[in-house]
């Protein structure tokens, strides 16, 4: 089994200093946590050049979704801390409204102000109504995506499978040509062909338009020839971030899964030696009656 940490490459920057001036994604010493809670992301720096396709890798709870949401401008951070194509992800709302910055998250949700939070999007809406009503879209690009994703414009979103609904979500997210695309485990419901076709499309887009993709996933099938960079996160920190050819373990093990397994086992073993900060607190809490627990099941 590999013991990767002695071989760890530059943990803070992906790319050389000459490339950094052209970074499409630039995160500098990011520190972020949910309000009233300790930081989830600590001293996090990551730089990705245009045209890169980076796998964001880490165990459950490592901080991948939180990072992608900060990069997508969903949480406020300092103007210089997160820069997407040279602009602040949170403060420059044109980044998302133009589609230059696109984010596809795990669940398709919509903010309903009266409900006070996001709710899953599952209303009786036609796929065609959604896709054809987006303004300012190149009709050829739209048709290409609809064909690629095998979407039937008569689908009703409340009467299709999870994978079909996901295809409509992906289509909507890609209608406008992106410069930076953030993907959070979006291919999980897709069948093998749909996933591979989508990966091919995205690779072609990033090569042709020099667009950057950051992709968080636990599914590594078919990713070896697709990724150009890898960023490994554990406990909210970047453990390693580098070009694929600069990661010694990936040179030795052609299978990404073998390397990822070794890294994640190391993360898990390391975290088992750190005492849970909340463990002491929990032990002093009154026991919750089982009828109350039933509410959460
Ligand atoms: N809404 C929230 N409020 C408080 N803490 C949260 C919230 N969402 C996530 N966290 C915490 O932030 C940490 C990072 O979570 P995150 O969802 O970013 O992990 P992840 O790497 O995406 O995990 P997974 O692989 O399971 O999707 C976890 O410890 C989690 O408990």
Image: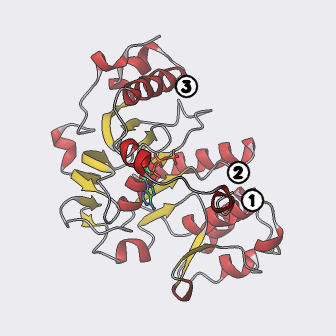
Q: Residue 267: give x, y in percent of width and height.
A: 41, 28
Dot 2 or dot 3, earlier in sequence: 2
Q: Marks 2 and 3, how far apart in space?
A: 20 Å
Residue at 35% over, 23% down: 247
Which numbered marker is on residue 162?
A: 1
Query: Reading the chain from its start, which is encountered first: label 1 or label 3?
Result: 1
Which numbered tag is attached to residue 257?
3
Q: Quadrant of residue 283?
A: top left
Check whether the beta carbons of the residues at disc 2 and disc 1 lie within 8 A of each other: yes
SS of the residue under disc 1: helix
In the image, residue 44 sits, relative to residue 268, either above or below, namely below
Q: Earlier in the sequence, mark 2 or mark 1?
A: 1
Q: Is residue 17 left or right of residue 83?
A: left
Kindly indicate the quadrant of the structure image that contains residue 280. top left
User: In this rendering, is residue 63 above or below 120?
Assistant: above
- Secondary structure under badge 3? helix
Q: Residues within 10 Å of mark 1 (few under 14, many from 20)?
A: some
Q: Is residue 63 visible?
A: no
- Taking the spot 28% from the left edge, 38% from the top edge, the residue there is 14
Report the side of 9 relative to 105 (left or right): left
Is residue 17 in sight in this rendering?
Answer: yes
Q: Which mark is residue 189?
A: 2
Percent coordinates x, y for residue 199 in the rendering: 59, 45
């Amino acid at each position: 089994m590999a013991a990767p940490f002695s071989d760890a490459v530059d943990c803070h920057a992906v790319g050389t200093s000459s490339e950094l001036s052209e970074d499409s994604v630039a995160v500098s010493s990011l520190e972020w946590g949910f309000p009233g809670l300790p930081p989830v992301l600590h001293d996090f720096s990551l730089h990705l050049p245009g045209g890169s396709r980076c796998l964001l890798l880490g165990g459950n709870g490592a901080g991948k979704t939180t990072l992608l949401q900060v990069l997508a401008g969903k949480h406020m951070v300092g103007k210089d801390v997160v820069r997407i194509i040279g602009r602040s992800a949170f403060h420059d709302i044109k980044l998302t409204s133009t589609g230059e910055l696109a984010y596809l998250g795990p669940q398709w949700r919509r903010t309903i102000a009266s409900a006070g939070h996001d709710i899953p999007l599952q209303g009786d809406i036609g796929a065609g109504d959604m896709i054809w009503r987006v303004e300012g879209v190149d009709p050829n690009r739209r048709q290409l995506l609809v064909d690629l994703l095998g979407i039937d414009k008569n689908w009703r979103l409340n009467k299709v499978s999870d994978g079909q609904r996901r295809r409509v979500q992906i289509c909507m997210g890609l209608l406008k040509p992106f410069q930076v695309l953030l993907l959070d485990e979006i291919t999980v419901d897709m069948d093998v062909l749909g996933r591979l076709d989508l990966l091919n499309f995205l690779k072609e887009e990033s090569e042709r338009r020099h667009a950057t993709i950051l992709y968080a996933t636990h599914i590594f099938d078919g990713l070896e020839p697709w990724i150009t960079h890898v960023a490994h996160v554990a406990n909210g920190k970047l453990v390693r971030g580098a070009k694929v050819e600069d990661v010694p373990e990936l040179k030795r093990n052609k299978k990404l899964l073998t390397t990822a397994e070794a890294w994640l086992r190391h993360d898990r073993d390391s975290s088992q030696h750190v005492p849970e900060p909340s463990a002491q607190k929990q032990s002093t809490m009154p026991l919750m009656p089982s009828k109350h627990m039933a509410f959460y099941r």
